[in-house]
Amino acid sequence: MQIKLSSFVKKEMLHILRDPRTMLVVLVIPVVLILLFGFTVSTDVNHIDVAVCAPVRGDAVRKTVERLCRTDLFRFKGFIDAPDIDAHLRTGKASAVVVLADDYETSGHYQVVLDGADVNTARVSEGYLRGVIGGGDQDLFVLQQVYNPEMKSAFNFIPGILGMIFLLICAIMTSVSIVREKETGTMEVLLVSPVKPAYIIVSKMIPYLLLSLVDLAIILLLAYFVLDVPLSGGVWNIILFSVVYLVLALALGMVVSNVAKSQIAALLMSALVMMMPVLFFSGMLFPPDNLPWALRWITYIIPARWYIDAMRKLMIEGVGLRSVLLEGGILVGETLLLLAAATKRFSDRLEG
Amino acid sequence: MDKVIQVKDLTKRFGSFTAVDAITFEVGRGEIFGFLGANGAGKTTAMRMLCGLSYPSGGSGTVAGFDIVREGEQIKRHIGYMSQRFSLYEDLTVFENMQLFGGIYGMSERDIRSRADDLLEKVQFASQRDTLVGSIPLGWKQKLAFLVATMHSPEIVFLDEPTGGVDPITRRQFWDMIRQAASEGTTIFVTTHYMDEAEYCDRVSIMVDGHIRALDSPQALKEQFGAKNMNEVFVKLCR
């Protein structure tokens, strides 16, 4: 007597296809997130209003101002006098004022006064201004940002979004769907049948794995064609690495479904144990190196951190698989651990 | 008579609590065996052990000729099971549910089709073959759950309070289906709280606090306890 895995997979596919909410989460949310983060939620800084205070206006001053005007990054708001600096910053007529010393011609001394109310913009402006002013004819100071010279934030967000969406689909949705069967009692009927529990689990995973791959394709296409992310590390490498992470997320979902007794519990558990750490500790929003040491240690066990790190390398830096061996090794190791934990807990006799 | 269930001193303990205390009984082929008892008397626990869902703490037994301790997997292939919670998939159609469970029990696609059409025809439900289960009335769902449990023509069907929350007319129709299946040689092992249903059984056992306190045909039990109906028998035993 042979039990067909296909009849199970088909059933899972039907569950997904007939539930509009699931389809919404799977197909619409990734696109919305990518476009949202790619275009609107952006930490890019452009068109910084810059005023210049230069009591002595020689050749060097003129050249510096020309350089400022040449780029899109700045809007030159004219020359102002020293006493007006404060007023200009306060009223928002300028968000940065460059003060060029009287002997700028010879010494190259300058000062930048920034509106620190928006720390992020201030910090970025500082970098830009140093680059543009300092990098004058004598190249006193050269700031070169490689891999992402325009500092587009989309580049940073896409790996993070991938890391989050795969957890959402693979870990949260599979665990909820397994727990749903426990809740409605269908799991009991399945366990009385000759189907091996492993079959039930595997057939739940396959459709979500396929859906995640569809999402990966959508996101990569959007990233490449709409947001101009270079994907220079090779698409197949990115896909290979993502599959490892997907299996890990599925194993995580299994562990959650073993522990959770109700769908709500599964959802809360997933959200607290998985989503929060991904947001805060994965490097998606904050660089892990900026965290206090205790929290920094937490980031070392968060799989998403390693995935996001590796994705940044593969997508933006364009390095090969060899450079992400550490990240890959850690992810594979964590996957094996989670799979072991998940299968150990699964019992085909529903005790109690 | 050919015995399809034989149980001796079957026991289940949860810590220091003994849910099922050394019960012994036999069920013959094609018999409708009523398994009665108050809530918490140990019926469900006993039944789970027979289905291979739970290991016994003591005692021995066979179901469909297989040992309940060692051959749980074999037992699962030869039984059908309908739980007290409605357990078909609401977002699948009537036929898709039958197809799934037929597939689980290793039936070929052609067998599934002919068997499904056959069963649906018999209960005059063929017109609803492609309706989503979620949109059919509860009574029909229960009947359907029974059909799905018997899709693969099992030797024994375990029914755990199959008629909870169902109206009296549908319950009667449900029992007609059960008797039909029994007359075709399927053994029915059923738990219920409805004493009129107990009257339909060939033999009835009544569990009280983990023990089987009475086991005989409804007629014999009524005579033994000097009762007019099964309800009185039950009340006398369980009080």
Image (spheres, helix red, strand yellow):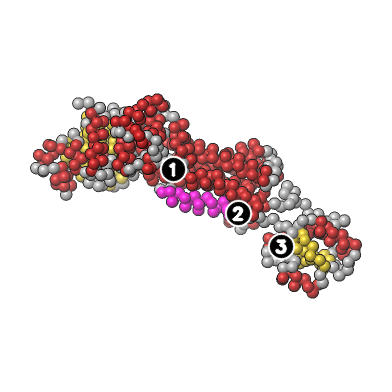
The answer to if A158 sits in the magenta stretch is no
Q: Give the side of residue A130 with respect to residue B108, left or right.
A: right
Which numbered disc flags the more N-terminal residue, 1 or 2? 1
Which numbered disc flags the more N-terminal residue, 3 or 2? 3
* Pick the front one: A319 or A6: A6
Say which quadrant the C terminus of chain A sits in: top left
Helix, strand or loop for disc 3: helix
* Pick the front one: B137 or A198: B137
Percent from the top left, x then y, of residue B175? Answer: 24, 36
Q: Which mark is residue A158?
A: none
Task: Tell me the CA gap for discs 3 and 2.
Answer: 26 Å
Q: Residue at x 22, y 37 (%)?
A: B34
At label 3, which amino acid type do we have? Ala
Q: Residue at x 22, y 26 (%)?
A: B2
State yes or no: discs 1 and 3 in contact (Cβ < 8 Å).
no
Dividing the picture into quadrants, the one containing residue B64 is top left
Determine which residue is flagged by label 1: A178
Percent from the top left, x then y, of residue A317? Answer: 70, 44
B148 in relation to A185, above or below: above
Circle 1 marks a residue in which chain? A
Label 3 Cα crowd, 10 Å radius (few <14 / some 14-19 / many 20+): some
Label 1 Cα crowd, 10 Å radius (few <14 / some 14-19 / many 20+): many
Q: Which mark is residue A296?
A: 2
Determine which residue is flagged by label 3: A122
Circle 3 marks a residue in which chain? A
At label 2, which amino acid type do we have? Arg
At label 1, which amino acid type do we have? Ile
Where are the magenta residues, as a range? Answer: A262-280
Dividing the picture into quadrants, the one containing residue B77 is top left
Task: Tell me the CA gap for discs 1 and 2.
Answer: 33 Å
Percent from the top left, x then y, of residue B137? Answer: 33, 43
Q: Residue at x 64, y 36 (%)?
A: A236
